[in-house]
Image (cartoon, rainbow, N blue to C red):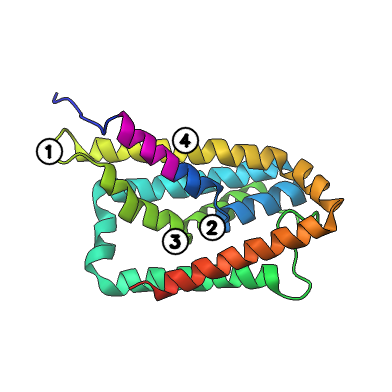
Amino acid sequence: MPAIALPGTAELTSFLVVVLGFAVTPGPNMIYLISRAIGQGAAAGLISLGGMVLGFVVYLLCAALGITALLTTVPFAHVTLRLVGAVYLMVLAWQALKPGGRSPFEIRSVRRSSGGRLFGMGLVTTLLNPKAALLYLALLPQFIVPGHGSVFVQTLVLGLLHIGVNLVVSVGIALTAGALAGVLARRPAWLRAQRWMMGGLLAAFSVKLAAEG
């Protein structure tokens, strides 16, 4: 069986830094995870996270099997993904910035959902998250070493590293969201600042995504 030559330490370190940045950047996954962890408890957040992880596995398998290459060869598919993602982000931004809007860290009552629904909504949130799709489509292949072992296996290893980093960060968020929300609730100015920062970032991401060719 031929040896698999993965990127060196420097390349892997760079990859981990990039995926850590993706994991801690506000986005649809983080907002959904926080809202569920605060509104229905850490266990609900962890169940939702399970669906999110499955969504990442779907993207990873698509990338490893070469299916995501269709998005680079079929312009309509790429444009559709980009515009749907931009609209989705703008909706989330409006929900944060509209009059009476709330921070994702603000404690509130949410309708309780079953475990299956939580898992399914987590899965859909990831599958509709353009940041996740673009990570596997545009970023991960840059760390593949062509001609050095199985590209399929290299893709799996790098993708699993991303999933592992994202899982660690997200578990921390799910377990601490309630405590952090309690701290912010005692400081209304912080809640407003966090809401405007979150909404502004989502709106900026939406505009940038829509403007990309």
The secondary element bearing badge 4 is classed as: helix
First in sequence: mark 3 vs mark 4 = 3
Q: Residue at x 58, y 49 (%)?
A: 119
Q: Do callouts 3 and 4 mark residues in contact (Cβ within 8 Å)?
A: no
CA gap between label 3 and label 2 equals: 10 Å
In the image, residue 14 lies in the stretch drawn in magenta: yes
Provide the residue designation for mark 1: 147
Provide the residue designation for mark 2: 125
The secondary element bearing badge 2 is classed as: helix
**Residue 171 falls left or right of residue 139:** right
- The answer to whether residue 110 is visible is no
CA gap between label 3 and label 4 equals: 19 Å
Q: What kind of secondary structure does the magenta stretch mostly adopt?
A: helix
Observer-nearest of 111 and 71: 71
The relative height of residue 47 versus residue 192 in the rendered view (above or below) is: above
Q: Residue at x 32, y 70 (%)?
A: 77
Q: Do callouts 4 and 2 mark residues in contact (Cβ within 8 Å)?
A: no
First in sequence: mark 3 vs mark 2 = 2
First in sequence: mark 2 vs mark 1 = 2
Q: Residue at x 66, y 42 (%)?
A: 174
Q: Residue at x 65, y 46 (%)?
A: 115
CA gap between label 3 and label 1 equals: 29 Å
Q: Amino acid at mark 1?
A: Gly
CA gap between label 4 and label 2 equals: 18 Å
The relative height of residue 196 versus residue 13 in the rendered view (above or below) is: below
The secondary element bearing badge 1 is classed as: loop
First in sequence: mark 3 vs mark 1 = 3
Task: Please provide percent x and percent y for residue 95.
Answer: 67, 70
Q: Residue 164, which numbered label?
A: 4
Task: Please provide percent x and percent y for residue 72.
Answer: 25, 64
In the image, residue 140 lies in the stretch drawn in magenta: no
